[in-house]
Amino acid sequence: MEAIQADDSLIKQEKEKLLREVREKHDLLEKEREEQARVAAEIAKIQSRLIVGQDDDSGKLETRTREQLAQLEHKRKELAEQKRREREIVEALERQEEDTVDLRQTFSDLRTETEAKTKKLKKLMIKLRQVCFWTPFFEF
């Protein structure tokens, strides 16, 4: 600042402008230092509550932590149970699909067998009718 004021080559307006900028930067720097100190104090306060547990909230914090751990364990168990049920359902669906394939194959085999026997029965019926038709003509 003093160097700026001592320099005669600068115009008065430029000097005032530069001085104003220096003051603003100085004020801003001071505010930042104050904010840093405030944040550091807040961090120290929180750390002391967490580490030392001297605050009235320490019991509440421990209780809340235990409750959250219990809830977390409960959720883990629920998730494990849900996954187990999902596996059972998938296995049941796979078994049902296999059974369906087996039933379709059996049905197809039975249909093929029925068609073959029906065809054979029709041939036998034709032969029977032919035998019955010709039998009266050949009586001795």
Image: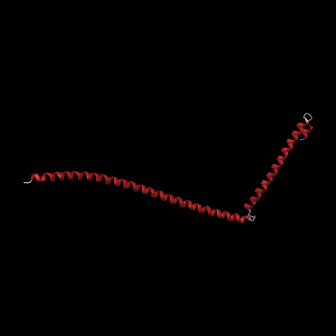
Foreground residue among 54 and 30: 30
Q: Which quadrant: the N terminus?
A: top right
Which residue is located at x 21 percent, y 53 percent? 125
Q: How many marks?
A: 0
Residue 2, percent from left and from top = 91, 41
125 to the left or right of 139? right
Colour mapping:
secondary structure
Front in this rendered view, residue 40 or 27: 27
Q: Residue at x 85, y 45 (%)?
A: 26
The x, y position of residue 69, in whole percent, is 63, 62
Nearer-the-camera pick, 30 or 129: 129
Residue 88 lies left or right of residue 118; in this view the side is right
Return the x and y of residue 82 as percentages of the image width and height.
53, 60
20 horizontally vs 108: left or right: right
Q: Is residue 52 left or right of residue 111?
A: right
* Residue at x 37%, y 55% (from the top left corner): 103
User: Outermost residue toward the top?
Assistant: 9
Residue 80 x, y percent position in the rendering = 55, 60
